[in-house]
Image (spheres, coloured by chain):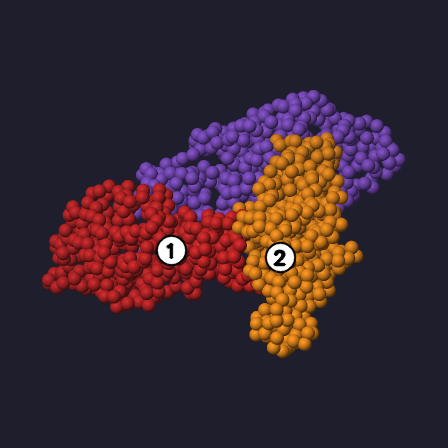
Chain colours: A red, B purple, C orange
């Protein structure tokens, strides 16, 4: 966990935005955990209904009072400057400044997170409790920020499996200096990517996407969506995986997809209560993956969900909010989901007419007549009976009430003696 | 409501039957509310398993005792004569008369409503409490009634919309001198027809049928059923809409039809408890519209349903039973159903891949990062996400829990900026 | 019932096994109740994953102590010899004998039922309480048993109906000297077969199979499975039908099959509580009938189910366990299932458009307007409305809540006047 802690510390101060140097630095740091391929999508590229924005690189942002005292400085906290602000360098009267100062009266010590990607404007964010510093008639406001044609940067990694069918993980990298939402997402996803690279000949192909939220995933879908639509069997948006609290699973749009069945089965086994929510078109990039033209089976397993804690989208969503053991537990759940996906096969039994003679293959006691309906024998018979080339092990587990692991073990024994083969 | 009251008063005394002058007079009076086309179907016409009966016009019906005192006279109440009685003019002994006298011992002050459309016979109906007047040995019975070849009269009105798809309303006009069942039905339907004629360019075509029950709707189906099967998207039998009591909705045979979904959504919003019943082959003309060869989506929204009040089918179902505010409320519910049908469209979003950029169309705040999941924004996103050309707004409302009106408003905004278009 | 009692007494002592003389004698005795055709399937025949075993005919099996005293003799109870044992005639030391002695410590007075069909071995079964007799160092063990190429014997009877569609009954005949499991099964099935032969022109063709469990039904499916797959509409494995206790119905694999709907409807009407279990691939020959390649709609109606009573598969499952009135009740339930299947038709109404005019066919009172929604009239209208050539009477009963018998009576009346005809 000290590695995760270090990553949080390194990545936290970076001024990320929808496009720009901050994103590239973030992806390069994450690449040290496990290498990422960087995709640069030029500013101005049309992606469905969207256009890739120009880069934004903030150099400096401050406000001085009439006596030249800096009463606000983005060096203290990069949320102080409205993200994607236009440059400005002016003396402004108080009346003009005040509407440009964003505060959260309900959380007076929090700097709110405000962006203006699609409307050129400038502005600052400040703790409501610090508004009283803004006395006097005139202020110097200065935002030195570059908005230039360049490119939006996405990170991508694909780990090839034996099958072209894909499992997708996606996280976003556009929020500056917030910990649960968003840093927990890309950090966990990097560690998960490294884990997947250690798998011996995985069945599925695993795809990991790190992109700015919304326009980033839309651009990625513009680039790869046609392929994803054919290949993705399950996917998850990794976000808000750092705070304590009960797990929340937001289902994929298709519902009852392999993504949902797998996540819910793994959640059911971890013992603690958890919450399940339907797919709705608010939230994160599952909105894009689930849009009517794609309908990808992409859900999201979170710890404390966006919008469900007061510090969300403020400077109070800081490293102190991260519960590292919970973060680790969530990483392990994602690893279990992968293990379950890898084990969950659809089988066709060699004997479809009548049951196979298990005794002659040493899979059944040769002494008949006595009680021997052990869990293992029940699992063996159940797998034989339902190995019809259509139901996967997760479905058989659900229908029979037999634990998945017991069925998987039975299936492996049956496969070993030639009574089952994997299909699909 | 004074108009409704006047109509009840004018129509109540008319001697309606399955065919005859009474029906024509009734339809002519209703035509003054809003014009109807009268269809005359000749006696003897075969309609599926039925034959259109001859006209029946009652001139006089009375019983006199041996001293010449009139102890029963249909001028007092037209239910006194069995509807569709054969003519008779005889002196009959008491033993022969008594089996021809129908009473309701359980409601001794009520004259029962008795018909004999398909078996020639004569008879009288009388309050059980008045049986004691029938002393003496002999009685003169006289029914002067014409049974003649002529035609069965139906009323029809079609209000054309932009679409050839139809909404059907049907009511019956064969019961004499009963108020909740039946007069409330044709009166409400006439007022509803007049309302529909005030709609500006309605989407649907609206069809209104006024017919004798059973053989009348069967004759109408014989005439227009093929067309109705192609065009009717929703329909309602309007009957028993005048008494107080909670609303009852009887579903259409197909169940979960547009008729059912619309009526149930409107009922759910009106606040009071209501009852829902399945389609069963007893009741009114929804039996015919739902018959296996048609299976039209025709339900029925009632206030107090037939068979659910003791005065049903007796002389006690009189004007005193009518709760005019309830009648008005029911009319308004039918108007709301029409409004809902008119508003409930199926949309296809212009952007199917990823979500549309709402900010650039001023449909979303351009300041990002702050809580703004207002009902309206949620509705806008929900309509975009589900505008796949297959789900109508009612279905989206049901699935999302967002009020229909909010979704309709959102859809209108999206349509205005070119992000949605109506399909189907 | 004295006949059933006699059959139990005659059949109980016979040494049945998977193949051999015992099975043939059993089938010949049952043939006296109602004739069976005997099918002989040669040893060594391949049947899907199985091979028909050789015959086993036990002549003698005993153990003597060193003083020549017989301390165990299969003439006392044929369960004493492990079923299908290899022959042996040796003096063995105690250490070698003990592992060959099977006991049930939890039921010390019971001889366990042990078989070894697919692994050549010899052994004995003994009451745990009698183990103390096995003192001394050496014992003479002798099993004189013939294992020879011959054939496995199955009994079959087919009662032709007007339709080629079949109802299948199957029971097993391989367990020696146990009463509830198994003798109650073949005895009840023989009586049921005799009953079916008394039916006047039955609609369905009825097939009765008497076979050794597992390999026997698999061999039968090998012989007739293709045909059964086409023709069987419902079937039942008859087993464990002799003990008191509440009825248990194990559903067929397809679930909601005609077999299930019929059995559950009949069970619902018999008044007592009963248990319903899903199809699982343990139990009896419904495992084979339900195997993925066949998926026949074969359930099983039992009284006390296998595995649900402590005496199961021991010498304590003896005639004293049989509750003859319950056995009789179960036979009657199977007869009712047959009666229900015979009566349950799918009808097409002559009048599909609008309802038929029932009055002119004397199926409806010709006096209208009065309450007459009797059960019979409701049933008549319901059958007319749902006689669409797709729903059978059982489905109509389930949907309408009207008792099956009332609907069947209504259907018969409607058929008699030409308003319905049977389809399918």
Quadrant housing the C terminus of chain B: top left
The image shows residue C174 at horizontal and vertical percentages of 65, 56
**Residue indicated by mark 2:** C147
Q: Residue furthest front?
A: C90
Residue nearest the observer in this picture, B284 or B80: B284
Secondary structure state at the residue bearing disc 1: helix
Q: Residue furthest bottom?
A: C136
The image shows residue C402 at horizontal and vertical percentages of 67, 46
Q: Residue at x 45, y 43 (%)?
A: B394
Figure quadrant of residue B55: top right
**Residue indicated by mark 1:** A342
Secondary structure state at the residue bearing disc 2: strand
Q: Residue at x 73, y 24 (%)?
A: B146
Quadrant housing the N terminus of chain B: top right
Q: Up-down: is B93 above or below C118?
A: above
Q: Up-down: is C410 above or below C280?
A: above
Q: Residue at x 60, y 41 (%)?
A: C227
Figure quadrant of residue C180: bottom right
**10 Å crowding of disc 1: few (<14), some (14-19), many (20+):** few
Residue nearest the observer in this picture, A42 or C218: C218
The image shows residue A337 at horizontal and vertical percentages of 38, 58
Residue nearest the observer in this picture, B88 or B301: B301
Q: Residue furthest left?
A: A68
User: Is residue B325 toward the left or the right of residue A337 in the image?
Assistant: right
Disc 2 to disc 1, C-alpha distance: 48 Å
Residue A123, which numbered label?
Answer: none
Residue B151 visible, this angle = no
- Chain identity of mark 1: A
Residues behind callouts 2 and 1 on a single chain: no
The image shows residue A300 at horizontal and vertical percentages of 36, 55
């Amino acid at each position: 966990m000290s590695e995760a802690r270090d990553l949080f510390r390194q990545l936290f101060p970076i001024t990320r935005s929808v496009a720009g140097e901050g994103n590239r630095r973030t992806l390069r740091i994450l690449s040290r955990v496990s290498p990422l391929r960087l995709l640069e999508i030029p500013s101005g590229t049309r992606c469905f209904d969207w256009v890739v924005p120009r880069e934004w690189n903030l150099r400096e942002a401050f406000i001085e009072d009439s006596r030249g005292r800096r009463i606000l400085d983005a060096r203290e906290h990069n949320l102080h400057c409205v993200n994607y602000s236009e440059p400005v360098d002016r003396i402004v009267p108080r009346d003009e400044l005040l509407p440009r100062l964003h505060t959260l009266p309900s959380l007076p010590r929090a700097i709110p997170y405000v962006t203006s990607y699609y409307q050129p404007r400038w502005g600052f964010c400040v703790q409501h409790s610090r508004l009283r510093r803004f006395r006097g008639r005139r202020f110097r406001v200065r935002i030195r920020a570059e908005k230039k044609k360049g490119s939006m940067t996405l990170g991508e990694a694909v780990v090839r499996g034996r099958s072209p069918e894909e499992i997708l993980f996606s996280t976003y990298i556009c929020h500056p200096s917030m910990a649960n939402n968003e840093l927990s997402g890309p950090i966990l996803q990097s560690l998960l990517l490294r884990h997947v690279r250690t798998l011996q000949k995985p069945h599925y192909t695993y795809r990991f996407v790190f992109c700015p939220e919304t326009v980033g995933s839309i651009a990625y879908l513009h680039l790869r969506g046609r392929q994803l639509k054919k290949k993705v069997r399950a996917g998850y948006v990794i976000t808000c995986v750092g705070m304590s609290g009960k797990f929340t699973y937001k289902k994929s749009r298709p519902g009852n997809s392999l993504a949902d069945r797998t996540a819910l089965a793994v959640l059911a086994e971890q013992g603690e209560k958890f919450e399940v929510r339907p797919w709705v078109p608010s939230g994160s990039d599952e909105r894009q993956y689930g849009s009517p033209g794609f309908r990808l089976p992409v859900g999201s397993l979170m710890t404390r969900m966006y919008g469900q804690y007061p510090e969300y989208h403020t400077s109070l969503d800081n490293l102190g909010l991260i519960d590292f053991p919970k973060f680790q537990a969530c990483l392990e759940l994602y690893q279990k989901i992968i293990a379950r996906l890898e084990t969950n096969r659809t089988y066709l039994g060699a004997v479809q007419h009548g049951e196979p003679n298990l005794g002659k293959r040493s899979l059944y006691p040769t002494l008949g007549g006595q009680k021997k309906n052990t869990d293992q024998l029940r699992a063996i018979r159940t797998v034989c009976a339902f190995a019809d080339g259509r139901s996967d092990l997760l479905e058989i587990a659900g229908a029979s009430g037999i634990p998945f692991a017991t069925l998987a073990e039975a299936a492996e024994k049956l496969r070993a003696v030639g009574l089952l083969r994997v299909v699909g």
